Image (tube, rainbow, N blue to C red):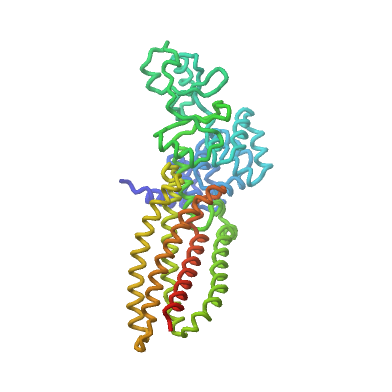
Amino acid sequence: MVDQTQDRKQLLERIVGLLDSKDSAVLKEVLTDARSSDVAEVVEVLDEIARQVLFDLLDPKDAGEVLEKIDEATRSEVVEEMPSEQLTDIIATLPPDEAADVMADVSDVSEEKSEEVLEQIDSAESDQIEKLMSYRDDTAGGIMNSDLVRVRIDQTIREATDEFRQADPDKDNYHVFVVDDQGRYKGTVGMRELVLYPRSTPIREVLSEDIPAIEVQADQEEIANTFRKNDLIAAPVVDENHMLLGRITVDDIVDVMEEEAEEDALVTAGTRPEELDTHNSFKAATVRLPWLLTCMLGALLSTIIFYPLYEPLFVKFGVAVWSYVVIFIPAIAAMGGNSGMQTATVVVRGLATGDLAALDISQVFIRESRVAFIVALACGLIAGLVALTFLNIYADTSSGDPLAVVLGISVGVSMFFAIMLSTMLGLFLPYIFRNIGIDPAISCGPLVTTTNDIVSFVTYFSFALLLLKVFGN
C-alpha cells in the first residue's frame, strides 16, 4: 500500500523548494498534477504569502476544489486575503452547496466582501447560493445540493433519459427524482430502470418509493443515521409541503459523520468545535477555559465546604483516623468518575446512532443498573479487602480498636454506592441534556466527571463517619 503521508511530505518539500527558487512554471505544473486534497493539506501549513502564490497559480476550478477542502480556520484566512475578483472566479466554478460553504466563511470575515462576490456571479447561481446560506450548516438545507435530475411522474423513460444526459457530467447523479405537476416529491427512478426498460415506459410504472425524503430542517446527525440504516447513496430533501428542494449524497454524509465524531470528541473533552475554526491561540483558549474553570471552581468549592464540615467530626476519633480516611479519597472518587463516564459514553453512543433501544430509557436503565451492580459489588469487595489489609498493617490495632475493620467496611461500602450513584448520573444526564436541547456528549465531559467525584467524595465521608459513630470507641 502506498504511503500517502510520505507522498504528502514529499509534495510539501517540493512545493516549498519551488517557492524558494521562485520557479513558477514548474510549481504550476506540480500543483496541476497533484490531488486537490494533498494540495489543501500543503496550503494548511504554509504562511499567508505562500498560500496566495499557490492560489494565483491554480486555475479557478482547481483553486475551488482546494479551497473547499482546506480546514475552516485556514479557509477563513485565505478568503480574507484573496481579492474579490479572484474569489468570484473561484466561487463560480463550485457546485452551489460547496459555494455556499465557502461564502459562509467569506460572510463571517466580511459581509461587504460577500455581497460584492455574490453580485458579480450569475444571478440564478447567486440566488441558489444565498438560499442555501439561509439554512443552518448542520441541517439538510445546509448540506444539500440543489443540482439534481428531476422529471414529472407523467413523463416516460425516454424523457427521463434525455434529462439525465443533459445533466452536468461532473455531478454524481445516482437517481432521477420524480415529482408531480406541483413539484412534490413522489419517488425515484434508478439507472437500472433507465437502461433496462423500453423507452416508452411511463415513469409511474417503474417509480420506486423506497428512498425516504429528508425534511430540509432535519439535523445532520439524524440524516447520517437515515443513510446508515437504509444503505442510501443519495436522498431527496423536501420542505414542509413535500416540495423537492435538492439532494444529499453519500459523500456529503461521510463529511457529516466525521464532523459529528469530531464534535462529540471535543465536547467530551470539555471544548467545542469552534476551537478548530481559528488559528488564534487566545480564541482557542477562551473556548476551553469555561468548562475547565467551572470544574476547577466546583472541585475547590467542594473542598472548601466539605473538608471543614467533616474534619472536626473525624478528628474526634483521632488525627490518625482522619489521615487513614483521607488516603482513600482518590480511589473512591476515581472509580466513581470512571464508572459514570463509561455509562454516559454507552448512552450517548446509543442516542447518537438513533437506536430505538437506546431511546427507551426504561430498557437502558434495567441493563445499566444490572451492569453497575455487578461492577460495584466486585469493586467494593476488592477495595474493602485491600483497605482492610492496608489498615491492619499500618494502623495501630493492638488495643483492640476496630479501626481497620470499620474503615475497611467504609471503603468497600462507599466504593459500591459511589459507583452506583455515578452510574445513575451517567445514565440519566444524557437524556436530561438531550430533552433540554443540549448535546448529550457533554455528559461525558469534565463537568459531569467533577460532579461524580464530588458525589463519591460525600458518599465515602458520610459512610465512614456513620460507621465510626456506630462502631468506633
**Location of residue 63 in the rendering, given as x and y in whole percent from the top left corner:** 52, 40
In the rendered image, the residue lying farthest to the right is: 112
**Location of residue 15 in the rendering, given as x and y in whole percent from the top left corner:** 46, 49
In the rendered image, the residue lying farthest to the top is: 200
Q: Please, is residue 83 above or below residue 48 in the view?
A: above
| Picture residue at 49% right of the left edge, 52% below the top | 430
**Location of residue 191 in the rendering, given as x and y in whole percent from the top left corner:** 40, 23
Residue 406 lies in quadrant: bottom left
The number of numbered discs placed on residues in the rendered structure image is 0
In the rendered image, the residue lying farthest to the front is: 470
Q: Please, is residue 70 above or below residue 161 in the view?
A: below
Q: Please, is residue 333 above or below residue 273 in the view?
A: below
| Picture residue at 37% right of the left edge, 18% below the top | 195
Q: Is residue 98 visible from the viewing direction of this image?
A: no
Q: Is residue 288 visible from the viewing direction of this image?
A: yes
Q: Camera-side residue: 300 or 269? A: 300
* Quarter placement of the C terminus: bottom left
| Picture residue at 42% right of the left edge, 55% below the top | 343
In the rendered image, the residue lying farthest to the left is: 1
**Location of residue 46 in the rendering, given as x and y in whole percent from the top left corner:** 51, 52
Residue 94 lies in quadrant: top right
Q: Camera-side residue: 246 or 29? A: 246
